Image (spheres, rainbow, N blue to C red):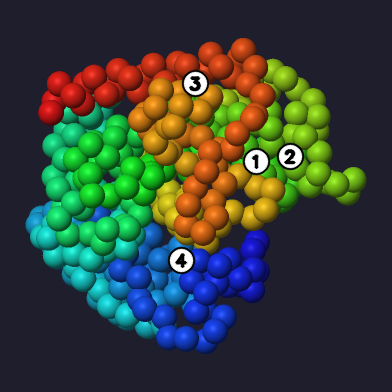
Amino acid sequence: MMSSGSLLQRLARWRPWVLRGEPKQAVKVLVTGAAGQIGYAIVAMIARGLMLGPDQPVILHMLDLPRAADALIGVRMELIDAALPLLRGVVATSDNAEAFKGVNVAILIGGWPRREGMKRKDLIAKNVPIYKSQASALQQHAAPNCKVLVVANPANTNALVLKEFATAIPAKNITCLTRLDHNRALGQVAEKLNVPVGDVKNAIIWGNHSSTQFPDASHATARTELGERPVKELVADEKWLTEEFVSTVQQRGAAVIKARKQSSSLSAASAACDHMRDWILGTPKGTWVSMGVCSDGSYGIPEGTFFSFPVTCEKGEWSIVQGLQIDDFARSKMEASASELKEEKSVAINVL
């Protein structure tokens, strides 16, 4: 676990006044779908400093549908009752203009949920209009440097819609969540090796946040008594790495639903905090994380596609890790996911 001192130093690189003792302005953080399970879990994490750091005040903007207004008021009441020192204000609303006004960070969790029997193209058809509307709200009301994280599925294609219709927001400021898959990959490796998850790093999630994603442990390392060693060497089981590990991470969300009769909430909220914290405060030296970002053509992925890559972050900017060796197995998996994203884009265009 990272020490509060280490996190404070990373925060200071992004906001240097932290170590100068100067008063800090509160960051406005929007959470859509805030009355839902992930929203309910994440707002307290944000207000406790788990997203932006232990010394960064926040003002929470919470948005949900009118039918969830009473629940949203209840969430606001609980936040006030928690007496969280970093929380400098709470806006609870069903109005897009009020919710998006001046926000510096937008966590977009709200969307049409996938129901039993729905095909992925049906999910896209339901969510494209929602994200076109949210793109308009971002365009008109958010701060120009707003950093956006799309959580709602289909996350990659929802992010693409935002990029196309919120042109005032730089494309590099729009991302989608694959950190939950990344964290799941780290967890599976840690369990396999019987080591703390904090001793495992540099797994990769390539591609779409769907069943075509490719969890890749071929570049991962784990800390041992003899120093850092490749996970491939420590596991010494190619079949596990290319079959069981991949399928377990790909299907983990479904397994959680089967076990608890509800989708992942706590882990998704935690992953969203991890994503934003590393993006804004920076990744530790020698460590990369997985983020769904707008491709610049790296690794042969078509430019403009929202695709999960390994990235490092510094001073609020992400950069795709370059020069990794991609074998034929990995290439085939990456191309399959890119092909699915191309199909999703076509569906979205037809809807629009």
Residue type indicated by callout 3: Gly
Mark 4 Cα-neighbour bin, 10 Å: few <14, some 14–19, many ≥20? many
Circles 2 and 1, Cβ within 8 Å, touching? The answer is yes
Which residue was labeled with disc 3?
Answer: 300
Q: Earlier in the sequence, mark 4 or mark 1?
A: 4
Left or right, 183 with reference to 264: right
- Mark 4 or mark 3: which comes first in sequence? 4
Residue at the spot of label 2: 221
Q: Earlier in the sequence, mark 2 or mark 1?
A: 1
Q: Quadrant of residue 211?
A: top left
Q: Is residue 268 above or below residue 122?
A: below
Q: CA distance from mark 2 to mark 1?
A: 6 Å
Please give the name of the residue rendered at 35% of the width and 70% of the height, measured from the top-left corner.
27
Question: Marks 2/4: CA distance?
Answer: 27 Å
Instruction: Indicate which disc residue 52 carries.
Output: 4
Distance in Å between CA atoms under marks 4 and 3 = 33 Å
**SS label for mark 4:** loop
Residue that appears at 27% across and 58% down: 144
